[in-house]
Each structure stands twice: as C-alpha cells, then as structure tokens.
Image (tube, rainbow, N blue to C red):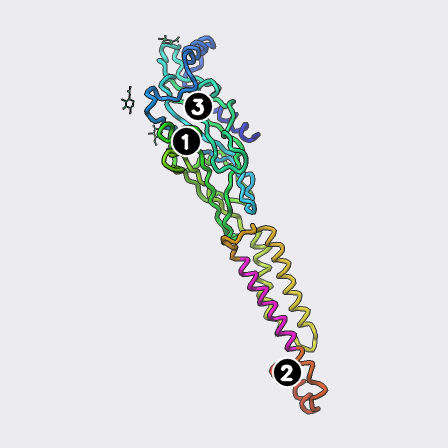
Amino acid sequence: MKMVSVVTVTIIQLLTISSAIFGTRGTTISEIDRLITNLTTGYNKNIRPPDNNTETLTVNCTFFLMSIIDYNDISGVLSITGGVMMTWIDPRLTWNPSDFSNIDHVVLKRSLIWTPDLYIINPANDLESIADDTYLARFFHNGLVTLGMGDNIKILCPSDMAYFPFDLQSCPIRTSAWGYFGHEVTLNPHVRTMDLTYFIKNNIWDVDSTSAEEFSLGTEYTGMISFTVNLRRKPLYFTISMMAPIFLLAMLNPFIFLLPVESGERISFGVTIFLSFAVFMTLLSDSLPKSSTPMPTICFFLFAAVTYSGMIVIVMMLILRLYQQDPEEKSPEMAEQTSLHPQLQLFKMP
Ligand SMILES: *[C@@H]1O[C@H](CO)[C@@H](O)[C@H](O)[C@H]1NC(C)=O
Ligand SMILES: *[C@@H]1O[C@H](CO)[C@@H](O)[C@H](O)[C@H]1NC(C)=O
Ligand SMILES: *[C@@H]1O[C@H](CO)[C@@H](O)[C@H](O)[C@H]1NC(C)=O
C-alpha cells in the first residue's frame, strides 16, 4: 500500500507539472469551483456513459506492474503491487474551455462521478474492488476521463514445476467491470503488454514477458481483460545448492567399485551416498508443491538416483558376502594367487 502511495504521489507530481504547462496556472480557485459545480450539477453518478445508454462504453485499460511481493509456488498464490490505468469518454463532462478561463482539465475524487469498478476474478483473498474510492480522476474538457488506481493484488496461480528450477510461471490477472455485461461496459486492452515503468526488480523472479488480452466467461460476461505476467525463476541458487550436489553424488556413486574390498569401506560409502540422496529428497520436498500434475522432473531423477544407489548397496553386500565366505575353504595356493589379484574375487563362485 505504501508503494502504491509513493507512485501515486509521483504520478500526481507529474500531472501537476503537466497542468502547469497546460494552463491551469493563473486560473483562480473560484473559476475551478464554478466549473466543477457546473459539471456536477445534475450529474447522476449511478448512470454510466455514454448518453445513448444502449451503446457500449469502452474503457481502455493498461496494467502497471510495480513489484512482485511474493510468489508462493507451493500454495500457488501470487502477490503483486500494481494497478490499472483506465481511460474512457464521459460526454456529460465536457465544457468549452473559453467559458472557464481556459481551464482544460480538472482533478476530482473518483467517488464524485461515475467510474467503473474493477474486480479481480481469480483472487486469492476476498472478491472485492481493486481499489477504494479515494483515488483521483482527471477530466479533460473533451470528456476524456483518466483514472489510475492500484492496490496489493493477490491472485491464484497454480504453479507448474515440471522444469524446476528452470520453470516459467504464467499468471493471468483477470479483471472485470463487475456488475456490467460485456455489451454495457467493455474493457479494452489497448496496449497489449503491461506497463513496467514503475517496476522494481524481484530477487527470485524475473519478469519474462507480459501480455493483455480480451477474456470472457460465457455469453454475457464478455469484455473482460486477462493481464498475464510470465515469471521466470532465477535458477542459480537452486542449481548451486541442490542440482550440483545431487549430480555430483550420482557421479560419485559408481566409484564405490574402485574401493578395495579389504578396506571394508564399501558399505559405509554406499550407505552414506544413499542417505545423502534421502536428505536431498527431504530438502527438495520442502521447496516443491506436493503436486502430481505435473511431477517435477527433478523428483523423478532423484527417485532414480535413490533406487540406483540402493541397488548398488545391495550388490555391494552380496559381493562382500561372497568374498568373506572363502578364506577357510581356500587352498593356500589359491589364497596366494587371489591376494595378488583381489578383483578376481568378485567373479569367483563360492
Ligand atoms: C454550465 O456552463 C454552461 C456554459 O457556460 C452553461 O450553458 C450551463 O447553463 C451551465 N450549467 C449549469 C448547471 O450551471
Ligand atoms: C442508441 O443506439 C442504438 C444502437 O447503436 C440505436 O439503434 C438507437 O437508435 C440509438 N438511440 C438514440 C436515441 O440515438
Ligand atoms: C482506446 O483505445 C483505442 C485503440 O485501441 C483508441 O482508438 C481510442 O481512442 C482509445 N480511447 C480512449 C478513450 O482512450
């Protein structure tokens, strides 16, 4: 919320500068007051524009993404800060600037006029309007209204961990002018991407790409927008702390056969590697959703590695058993011979 207000302040500052250029300077408060009174007298804010109410009102929307606060890939909840900049035409709010000391735009609380309420329809918390009534809207003399409002938005976005940690998560933010059918108020994604001007980088996720397209829920509930943000995980941490050790252990495992049988270390080496895999399995299951659709590929790999490691331990036990059986039954010559070539022991029948 704090970030939203910081950016709102920035936007307001920018707009104040532009208003200085565009001519509100020099106009008196009473002139602006006269204009606002003129505009709001007889204005019913419950009725949507345009004048002919059978026509569709098109509201142009751009999503501005400010930050990714958190993406919990286990519960599938994406929490972002951002908002929507909307523009539309309200023919009731037009005036001739020359009648009002050349004032060509005014700023008003959005609660004073008709504004569309945007709802996120795939929320992770309550279904409520994207922002409260305190945001300011800007009116131009030709009827153009611009309104930017934002909030902390939490949406449901089940994760796809098949390629963890090289995964790409695609999270749609579905917005609707709740209460209006598509033929009454239509949201128009006139820019096909999100606005990343105010975006602050995240440590875990990179924004790979963004998009905005029309979206509908059926025959009448059309004219919605789905803003999609594609997040790519920064894989370095998991590569170093998880993938690299697992691959190293898997490579280390066959070297068990290089150890001399007499040293008695083969079993402890095999079991240690087996247990290390088990430890990594526990670690990994903490950072992955308990989902089977789809299973992360790394889980299959780890399962294969554990099976393989377990089989090596079993083979090793059999080999040691066969090796230990011999000495009493062996003839002195045989013992002498085989002690020169200990590896032959492996292939000798009991
Ligand atoms: C608003 O201003 C216009 C033009 O000056 C004028 O014709 C109209 O009567 C005014 N309306 C009200 C409600 O004051
Ligand atoms: C309002 O718009 C509809 C559809 O565009 C049109 O058929 C109708 O004649 C219009 N009514 C008026 C009063 O302009
Ligand atoms: C909305 O966007 C369209 C382009 O998609 C543009 O032609 C139109 O003028 C815009 N309307 C407003 C009110 O900004």
Residue topped by disc 2: 345
312 magenta-colored: yes
Q: Is residue 236 visible?
A: no
Residue count near mark 2 (Cα–Cα under 10 Å), binned few <14, some 14–19, many ≥20: some
Q: Amino acid at mark 1?
A: Cys
Of labels 2 and 3, earlier in sequence is 3
Give me the C-alpha separation between circle 2 and circle 3: 87 Å
Q: Amino acid at mark 2?
A: Gln
SS assignment at label 2 = helix
Ligand 1 - quadrant of the structure image: top left
Residue topped by disc 1: 61
Residue count near mark 3 (Cα–Cα under 10 Å), binned few <14, some 14–19, many ≥20: many
Nearest the viewer among 134 and 339 is 134
Q: Are marks 1 and 3 in contact (CB under 8 Å)?
A: no
Q: Main secondary structure of the magenta part?
A: helix
Residue topped by disc 3: 115
In x, y percent, where is residue 89?
A: 37, 23
The answer to whether 139 appears left or right of 311 in the picture is: left
The answer to whether 210 appears left or right of 328 in the picture is: left
Nearer mark to the viewer, of 2 and 3: 3
What range of the chain is rendered magenta?
298-319
Find the residue positioned furthest to the right: 328
SS assignment at label 1 = strand
Nearer mark to the viewer, of 1 and 3: 3
Q: Amino acid at mark 3?
A: Thr
In which quarter of the view is residue 258 placed? Answer: bottom right
Q: Where 346 sits versus 215, above or below? A: below
The answer to whether mark 3 is within 8 Å of ligand 3 is no
Nearest the viewer among 302 and 256 is 302
154 magenta-colored: no
In x, y percent, where is residue 306?
A: 59, 64
